[in-house]
Amino acid sequence: MLDTNAIIYLLNGSLASPLPDGLYCVSIITEIELLSFPDLSRDEEQKIRFLLEELQTIPLTDEVSAKTIELRRNNKKIKLPDAVIAATAILQQAVLLTNDQIFSDIDSLSYQSLQLLPTQS
């Protein structure tokens, strides 16, 4: 499962290596986050939509809602969108590809950080 930042890195060419082989999905929250950036250009939006068409988008279900509530009750630091993404990954039994360290506090979540290209000054 791809987190929002993983897709941004992928689209920006910031990944040091290709994504691991596998089937990929995203939470509906990731889709909302990606398409709601205030300064998103038409070209950027088209690139995002093209990529999202290739991925399965997991909707917000009653099961995801219940798991999100459980996660937020157990971790007061996690924001609602991140809790929904984590709950979705857990219920899909998916590894979440992300560089957001907030997910390291969730014991039941399998996640993997992505290696990025060095930034150029």
Image (cartoon, helix red, strand yellow):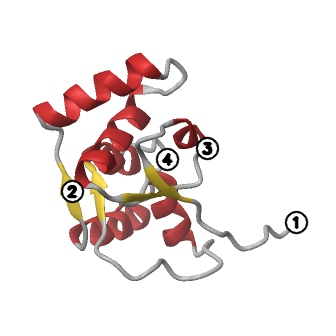
Residue 104 placed where, x, y %? 57, 43
Q: Are marks 3 and 2 in contact (CB under 8 Å)?
A: no
Residue 33 sits above or below residue 2 on the image: above
Q: CA distance from mark 2 to mark 4?
A: 23 Å
Mark 3 / mark 2, whichever is N-terminal: 2
In three-dimensional space, the C-alpha distance between marks 4 and 1, rounded to whole angstroms, equals 23 Å
- Quick one: label 1 or label 2, which is nearer the N terminus? 2
Amino acid, disc 3: Gln
Identify the residue shown where x is 34% and y is 78%: 22
Looking at the picture, tell me which residue is in the foreground, 15 or 104. Answer: 104
Residue 60 badge? none
Please, is residue 84 above or below residue 121 in the view? above
Asked whether disc 4 touches disc 1, contact meaning CB atoms under 8 Å apart, the reply is: no
Disc 2 is placed on an element classified as strand
Image quadrant where one finds the N terminus: bottom left
Instruction: Work out how far the residue at label 3 is from the one at label 4, CA to CA, in angstroms.
Output: 26 Å
Residue 39: image tag: 4
Q: Nearer the viewer, residue 120 or 62?
A: 62
Which residue is found at the position 58% from the left and 75% from the top? 13
Circle 3 residue: 101
